[in-house]
Image: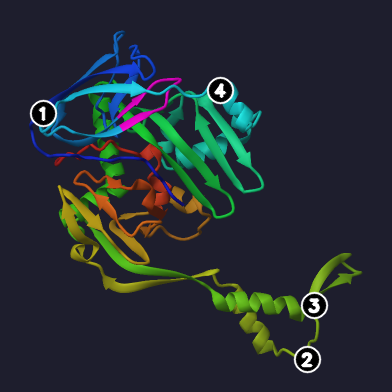
C-alpha cells in the first residue's frame, strides 16, 4: 500500500521570519478573486484572499516552501517559494478557470450513487483505521465524485471543493485539496495526493494538553519522524533499525501449483452430492511427495529475505544540496521502530492472530532511483516512495501532522 501527499520544502530551524503578501486574480482578465484559500503546503500557515484579491501571511520562518492557492472553479496553483530574503516576498497569482462540471461529465461519467457505494472504502484508504481515525470526521463528503473503471480494475475519486476533515483526536481541522485518488484493485495499491492545510482547533488548557500528548505519540510512529531522524543522523538514538530486504516470487510454489492442476481431477461424490478433487493416478506420487506439495502450498506467494546487517545513515544518504539530502537504496528497506509495539487495530485490520511486535514498515523507491529529504521530514518527489506494512496503515490523514510541528522536549 502507498500514502502520497505533496509536501515540498523545509522549515529552517531559525527565528528569522518573513511576511508573504500578494494578490490572487483571474488569469483571463486580471480581475481579483475573493475568498481564495492561500496556504503553505502541509503546514498551519494559511489565510484567504480579500475582496480585492490581496492576501498576507505574516511571521513565516525563513526557508523554502510550496505555496498553494485554491478556489472553487479554478485549477489549483502550486509553486515553490524561497523566503530567505533573496527574492521579493510578493506574489501575483493568476488562477486558470476549470472546465464546467457539465463538460467533465460528457467526457467520463461518475457513479450515480458514488458515496453510498464507495464512501466506506474511501474513508478507510484516505482517513485510515487507526485509533486517531475513530475520532476523525469528513465533514463534506458530498463534494466527492467516483469513477469506477471496471475493465481496467481501478477506482478514481475527485473532489469539487477542498475536503474538510475534523480531527478531534489531534486537535486539527484539515482542509485538503485533493489532486488525485486511486484504488488499484488488481495490484492492491492505493494512492492519493493533495495539499493539506492545518488549522488549530480551539480548546481550553485541558484539551490542549490532550492534543499535545496525542500529537507526540502520533509523531513517534510516523514516517516524518523516521525521515527527520535519518536527516539528522540519529536513527539508532531514536530506536530505528534499518535493513536491506528482498521480495521475490515463490517460484517453487508456482511450479507445484501448476503441477497440482495435472495430478488432480474433479469427480462427482454421489454421497455428498458435490465435486471433489482426487488424484488422477494414485500410483505416480508417494505420500511423501504429496506432503511436500502441501507444505509448499502453505507458503506465501512471495519469499521475503531480510538481511541481518544494519544499514548506516551514510549508506542511505549519499549527497546533499542546499540543505537537502539524497536518499538512495536498493531493493526494499525493512524499518523497525524497536521502541514501539504495533497497535492491536493494525493486527485486526490485516487479520493477523499474534502478539504485537515492533512497529515494522517497508520502503521502496518507485519509478525513481532516489528521493530528496529535508530537515523537517518532507521528501520529494513524493510519488516516488512506496510505503508498506505499518506506515501504510498508520500514516494516513487521521495521523498526519503539519511540517511545522515539533514534539515538546518535556511532557
Q: Please tell me which residue lies in front, 288 or 375.
A: 375
Q: Earlier in the sequence, mark 1 or mark 2?
A: 1
Q: Earlier in the sequence, mark 4 or mark 3?
A: 4
Q: Which residue lies under the disc numbered 4? A: 101
Q: Which residue lies under the disc numbered 1? A: 17
Label placed on residue 121: none
Label placed on residue 278: 3
In the image, what residue occupies the spot 35% across and 63% down? 334
Q: Earlier in the sequence, mark 3 or mark 2?
A: 3
Q: Which quadrant of the figure has residue 326?
A: bottom left
Q: Residues within 10 Å of mark 2 (few under 14, many from 20)?
A: few
Q: Earlier in the sequence, mark 1 or mark 3?
A: 1
- Secondary structure under tag 3 reads strand
Q: Which quadrant of the figure has residue 195?
A: top left
Mark in the foreground, 1 or 4: 4
In the image, what residue occupies the spot 8% across and 33% down? 15
Residue 131 locus on image (x, y percent): 41, 40
Q: Residues within 10 Å of mark 1 (few under 14, many from 20)?
A: some
Determine whether 363 is above or below 96 in the image: below
What stretch of residues is rendered in magenta?
68-78
Asked whether residue 201 appears in the rendered view, the answer is: no
Q: Which image quarter holds the C terminus?
A: top left
Residue 62 locus on image (x, y percent): 13, 33
Amino acid at each position: 500500500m502507498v500514502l502520497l501527499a505533496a509536501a515540498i520544502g523545509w522549515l529552517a530551524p531559525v527565528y528569522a521570519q518573513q511576511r508573504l503578501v500578494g494578490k490572487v486574480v483571474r488569469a483571463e482578465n486580471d480581475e481579483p478573486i475573493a475568498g481564495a484559500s492561500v496556504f503553505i503546503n502541509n503546514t498551519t500557515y494559511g489565510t484567504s484572499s480579500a475582496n480585492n484579491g490581496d492576501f498576507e501571511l505574516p511571521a513565516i520562518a525563513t526557508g523554502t516552501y510550496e505555496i498553494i492557492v485554491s478556489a472553487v472553479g479554478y485549477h489549483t496553483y502550486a509553486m515553490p517559494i524561497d523566503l530567505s530574503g533573496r527574492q521579493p516576498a510578493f506574489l501575483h497569482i493568476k488562477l486558470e478557470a476549470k472546465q464546467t462540471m457539465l463538460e467533465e461529465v460528457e467526457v467520463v461519467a461518475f457513479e450515480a450513487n458514488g458515496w453510498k457505494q464507495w464512501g466506506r472504502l474511501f474513508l478507510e484508504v484516505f482517513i485510515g483505521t487507526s485509533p486517531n481515525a475513530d475520532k476523525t470526521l469528513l465533514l463534506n463528503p458530498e463534494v466527492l465524485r467516483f469513477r469506477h473503471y471496471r475493465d481496467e480494475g481501478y477506482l478514481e475519486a475527485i473532489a469539487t471543493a477542498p475536503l474538510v476533515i475534523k480531527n478531534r483526536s489531534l486537535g486539527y481541522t484539515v482542509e485538503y485539496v485533493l489532486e488525485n485518488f486511486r484504488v488499484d484493485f488488481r495490484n492492491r495499491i492505493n494512492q492519493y495526493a493533495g495539499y493539506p492545510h492545518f488549522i488549530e482547533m480551539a480548546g481550553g488548557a485541558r484539551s490542549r494538553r490532550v492534543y499535545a500528548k496525542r500529537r507526540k505519540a502520533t509523531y513517534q510512529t510516523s514516517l516524518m519522524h523516521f525521515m527527520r531522524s535519518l536527516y539528522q543522523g540519529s536513527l539508532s538514538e531514536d530506536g530505528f533499525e534499518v535493513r536491506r530486504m528482498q521480495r521475490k516470487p515463490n517460484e517453487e510454489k508456482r511450479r507445484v501449483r501448476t503441477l497440482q492442476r495435472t495430478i488432480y481431477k474433479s469427480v462427482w461424490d454421489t454421497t455428498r452430492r458435490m465435486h471433489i478433487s482426487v488424484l488422477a493416478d494414485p500410483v505416480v506420487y508417494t505420500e511423501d511427495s504429496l506432503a511436500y506439495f502441501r507444505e509448499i502450498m502453505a507458503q506465501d506467494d512471495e519469499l521475503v529475505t531480510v538481511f541481518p546487517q544494519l544499514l548506516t545513515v551514510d549508506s542511505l544518504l549519499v549527497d546533499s544540496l542546499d540543505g537537502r539530502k539524497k536518499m538512495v537504496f536498493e531493493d526494499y528497506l525493512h524499518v523497525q521502530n524497536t521502541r514501539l509495539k504495533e497497535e492491536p487495530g493494525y493486527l485486526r485490520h490485516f487479520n493477523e492472530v499474534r502478539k504485537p511486535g515492533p512497529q515494522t514498515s517497508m520502503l521502496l523507491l518507485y519509478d525513481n532511483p532516489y528521493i530528496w529529504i529535508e530537515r523537517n521530514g518532507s521528501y520529494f518527489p513524493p510519488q516516488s516512495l512506496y510505503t508498506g506494512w505499518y506506515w501504510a496503515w498508520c500514516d494516513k490523514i487521521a495521523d498526519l501532522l503539519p511540517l511545522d510541528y515539533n514534539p515538546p522536549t518535556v511532557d
